[in-house]
């Protein structure tokens, strides 16, 4: 078996022990004799998987009882619509969007189809290389909610702490940094994350919703788009993505049992990110980071090389060394190294070492 270091932004690297257990269960679940791909979603087995995944998330993030956890489909992109459809219904109501990258911008655009929105901040003018300070935010104290993106996957810009929004419910797209560190969950009204960056495979999206925000949701939406319906039916409105939920259960168990929790995960993530940012900062300008140093992401490290030609050579030489999927998104260019939870320290070490060697040769 030949595995490479996978720096893909998503679907992304998963822990090897998770893949090994899934491989075993793909043929037959112990004691049941059917594959994890063949089992019904109304079975005792799946009820337990769903409850365990939910309990693991609750324990890892210390989620209090006044928050509900649901498993949804349609990816984070559907949340861009579900959030305003559920929460932006009262006449005259409007929602604030803090736009620090491509995903936040897309979320704001999509929300306009459902209701009135206002851009509380955008860093578009500097190609999303920074975060707002508190006084940059033009917040409406009467807004239905404030939406922000905790980690902009394409630009590599990450909030260190939650924006201060007063009493207005804070809604977060945490797709690409979910479970990378502990969170003060009580600051959030609603937090959602598709699984395929840090929590599992594509096909399931997790949402954590506070009771008062749930109470604010309208019933005038299709059943399959109603947070309240998902809560009332324990995420079993229709056939859920059984396999994806099962992998989320395994990944959250790995985080608790093998990693040792989210504080430990954050320390490991900081170590990995530091290796790469040090390689950028000690390169005498050969590598140029996209995000400003005060908002650099722990998950997606974005940087450019002197020109396109050198970048193409870098990508080819990296691949020869088993360092794959490093090409940056076209809107930023250059390199993007996604170093999610499951990327081992050795992967970041190998990339940092390669960066030093490549620079000295160039
Ligand atoms: C990947 C990503 C999305 C899109 O997720 P889908 O599941 O493909 O819809 C949205 N927001 C952020 C921050 C992402 O990283």
Image: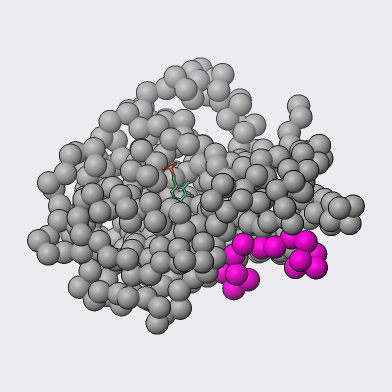
Span colored in magenta: 281-295
Q: Can residue 232 be seen in this view?
A: no
Specify whether residue 359 is in view.
yes
Identify which residue is drawn at 45% across, 78% down. 133
Residue 283 in the image: x percent, y percent? 80, 64
Provide the major secondary structure of the magenta segment: loop
- Left or right of residue 205, residue 316 in this image: right
Please tell me which residue lies in front, 144 or 99. Answer: 99
Residue 289 location, quadrant: bottom right
The answer to whether residue 288 is magenta is yes
Determine which quarter of the picture holds residue 169. Answer: bottom left
Give the x, y percent position of residue 94.
Answer: 20, 64
Report the number of discs. 0
Up the image or down, 240 lies above or below 270; here it is above
| 144 shown above or below 359 | below
- Residue 135 lies in quadrant: bottom left
For the residue pair 76 and 39, the one nearer the viewer reads as 76
Q: Residue at x 29, y 60 (%)?
A: 210
Q: Would residue 346 appear left or right of 26 to someone viewing this image?
A: right
Q: Is residue 72 above or below residue 348?
A: above
Relative to 120, say whether 190 is above or below.
Answer: above
- Kindly identify the residue that appears in the image at 48 percent across and 36 percent down: 202
Question: In this orientation, which residue lies closer to the viewer: 1 or 294?
Answer: 294
Task: List x then y, in percent, for residue 101.
Answer: 47, 59
Instruction: Name the outermost residue toward the right.
Output: 361
Residue 252 in magenta stretch:
no
Q: Where is residue 99 in the image (x, y as percent from the top left)?
A: 40, 63
Left or right of 20? Residue 317 is right
Tell me the quadrant of the picture where the N terminus can be found: top right
């Amino acid at each position: 078996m030949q595995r490479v270091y996978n720096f893909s932004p998503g679907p992304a690297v998963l822990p090897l022990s998770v893949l090994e257990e899934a491989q075993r269960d793909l043929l037959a679940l112990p004691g049941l004799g059917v594959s994890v791909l063949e089992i019904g979603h109304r079975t005792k087995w799946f009820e337990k998987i769903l409850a365990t995944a939910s309990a693991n998330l609750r324990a890892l993030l210390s989620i209090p009882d006044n928050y509900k956890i649901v498993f949804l489909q349609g990816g984070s992109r559907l949340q861009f619509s579900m959030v305003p459809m559920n929460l932006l219904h009262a006449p005259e109501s409007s929602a604030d969007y803090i736009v620090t990258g491509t995903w936040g911008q897309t979320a704001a655009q999509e929300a306009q189809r459902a209701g009135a929105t206002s851009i509380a901040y955008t860093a578009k003018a500097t190609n999303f290389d920074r975060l707002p300070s508190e006084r940059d935010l033009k917040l409406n104290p009467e807004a239905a909610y404030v939406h922000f993106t905790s980690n902009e996957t394409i630009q590599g810009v990450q909030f260190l702490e939650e924006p201060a929004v007063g009493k207005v419910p804070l809604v977060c797209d945490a797709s690409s940094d979910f479970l990378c560190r502990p969170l003060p969950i009580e600051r959030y009204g609603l937090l959602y994350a598709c699984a395929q960056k840090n929590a599992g495979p594509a096909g399931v999206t997790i949402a954590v919703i506070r009771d008062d925000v749930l109470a604010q949701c309208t019933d005038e939406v299709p059943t399959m788009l109603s947070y309240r319906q998902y809560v009332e039916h324990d995420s079993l409105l229709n056939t859920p993505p059984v396999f994806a939920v099962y992998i989320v259960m395994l990944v959250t168990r790995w985080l608790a049992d093998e990693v040792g929790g989210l504080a430990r995960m954050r320390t490991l993530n900081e170590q990995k990110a530091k290796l790469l940012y040090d390689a950028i900062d000690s390169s005498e300008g050969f590598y140029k980071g996209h995000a400003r140093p005060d908002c650099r992401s722990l998950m997606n490290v974005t940087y450019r090389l002197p020109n396109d030609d050198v970048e193409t050579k870098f990508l080819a030489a990296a691949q020869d060394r088993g360092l794959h999927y490093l090409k940056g998104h076209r809107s930023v260019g250059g390199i993007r190294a996604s170093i999610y939870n499951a990327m081992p320290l050795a992967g970041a070490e190998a990339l940092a070492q390669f960066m030093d060697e490549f620079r000295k040769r160039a």
